[in-house]
Image: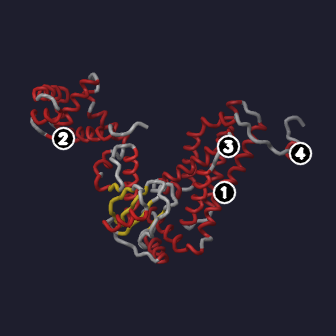
């Protein structure tokens, strides 16, 4: 019958997707990745919690790799998938550390495939793609999901069958639970700590290592919990990070730059790690000066000022609105003078020396600032907000171009 697939048609093996199909799919990737993330976290709230925690960035990279490599391999069947393969295995290992089966992870993969198929139908109608091509896409996608599940199973079984490394597996799972935060009952952490032979401390310090960190050159202290297989490797030290710990870390990872978080109660471990990672990010962009060991306690104000760039931009727009319409050169001169006055509260002569201009020039600029800003400079709250904006802007100006 016309329009009805015959048995011989169904039995014919489907060929590979044409490479040109990648050009149709690639523009859809950013919004598709976002849509899959939203749907998966809605269906599996556990993953929503993990995305907000210290493993969130690694999970996002894994999701993006899992989706984008499919398109890369359509465009070029021999495209490498090394990072995707390792990320999928890490997903499997993560499920084992968390004490779950693979059912939830596989369900997330299949949900992502359904969302991708739904999107493909819309794209197919838009480009008037043939039913055979769409069927080929569906077949290729399902085969690809099987591949992702196989890779994750490899990582899962790697943990489950590691009898000789049972204690190490317990300790890594313990670290995962500690960093998961408040949704995990404390008694669950205490029970696992007892199994791993690890005494629960009252305070901990998290350390983030810059990749690649490799394997430790000397044994870490027995009370240190470590996860070096993650894309963002990290360590947990019970108690404060003192000089002895510093020497041990340098000997274990020679030449590797690290960021040391703040010492916090056990329940705040994820915050300590988050701050340490932010310091490494700020070093990478040039805002914080690079050094072998960067300590969060030396950069707390910087971390706070730059913790919410979008909100800072809104605050800057409000506080600096009076000079927004000035020419760039005049605005820069006045803002520079305002910053110096707010930071030093010095005399015109002192500010002039600081800026390398004549004191009379400072007086002229300050009169102009008083006229332009009006009561904003006499209001303590607004004056404080303006100073915060100028300090944060100064920090941002150190950022290296991408």
Q: Quadrant of residue 401?
A: top left
C-alpha gap between disc 3 and disc 4? 30 Å
Q: Nearer the viewer, residue 120 or 212?
A: 212
- Sooner in the amino-acid sequence: mark 1 or mark 3: 3
Residue linked to disc 3: 73
C-alpha gap between disc 3 and disc 2? 56 Å
Q: Residue at x 9, y 33 (%)?
A: 349
Which numbered marker is on residue 377? Answer: none
Residue 112 at x, y percent in the picture: 62, 49
- Sooner in the amino-acid sequence: mark 4 or mark 1: 4
C-alpha gap between disc 4 and disc 1? 30 Å
Q: Residue at x 24, y 24 (%)?
A: 330
Residue 162 at x, y percent in the picture: 60, 71
Can residue 182 be spotted in the picture?
A: no
Residue linked to disc 2: 343
Residue linked to disc 4: 7
- Sooner in the amino-acid sequence: mark 2 or mark 1: 1
Q: Is residue 231 above or below residue 200?
A: above
């Amino acid at each position: 019958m016309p329009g009805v697939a015959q048995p011989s048609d169904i039995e014919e093996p489907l060929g590979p997707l044409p490479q040109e199909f990648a050009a149709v799919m690639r523009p859809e990737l950013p919004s598709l990745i976002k849509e899959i993330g939203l749907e998966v976290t809605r269906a599996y709230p556990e993953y929503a919690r993990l995305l907000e925690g210290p493993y969130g960035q690694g999970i996002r990279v894994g999701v993006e790799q899992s989706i984008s490599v499919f398109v890369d391999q359509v465009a070029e069947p021999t495209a490498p998938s090394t990072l995707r393969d390792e990320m999928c295995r890490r997903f499997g290992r993560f499920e084992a550390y968390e004490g779950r089966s693979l059912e939830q992870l596989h369900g997330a993969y299949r949900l992502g495939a359904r969302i991708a198929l739904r999107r493909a139908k819309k794209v197919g109608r838009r480009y008037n793609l043939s039913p055979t091509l769409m069927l080929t896409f569906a077949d290729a996608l399902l085969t690809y999901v099987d591949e992702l599940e196989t890779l994750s199973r490899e990582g899962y079984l790697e943990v489950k069958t590691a009898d000789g490394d049972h204690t190490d597996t317990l300790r890594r799972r313990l670290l995962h639970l500690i960093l998961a935060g408040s949704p995990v009952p404390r008694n669950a952490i205490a029970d696992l700590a007892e199994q791993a032979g690890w005494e629960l401390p009252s305070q901990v310090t998290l350390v983030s290592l810059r990749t690649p960190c490799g394997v430790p050159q000397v044994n870490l202290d027995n009370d240190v919990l470590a996860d070096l297989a993650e894309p963002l490797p990290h360590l947990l030290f019970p108690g404060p990070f003192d000089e002895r710990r510093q020497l041990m870390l340098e000997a274990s990872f020679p030449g590797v730059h690290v960021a040391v978080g703040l010492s916090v109660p056990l329940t705040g471990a994820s915050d300590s790690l988050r701050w340490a990672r932010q310091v490494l990010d700020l070093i990478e962009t040039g805002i914080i000066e690079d050094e072998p060991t960067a300590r969060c306690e030396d950069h707390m104000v910087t971390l706070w000022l730059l913790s919410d760039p979008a909100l800072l931009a809104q605050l800057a727009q409000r506080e600096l609105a009076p000079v927004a319409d000035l020419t760039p050169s005049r605005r820069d001169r006045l803002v520079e003078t305002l910053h110096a006055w707010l930071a030093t509260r010095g005399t015109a002569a002192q500010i002039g020396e600081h800026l390398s201009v004549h004191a009379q020039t400072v007086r002229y600029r300050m009169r102009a600032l008083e006229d332009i800003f009006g009561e904003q400079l006499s209001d303590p709250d607004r004056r404080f907000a303006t100073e915060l904006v100028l300090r944060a802007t100064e920090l941002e100006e150190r950022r290296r171009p991408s």
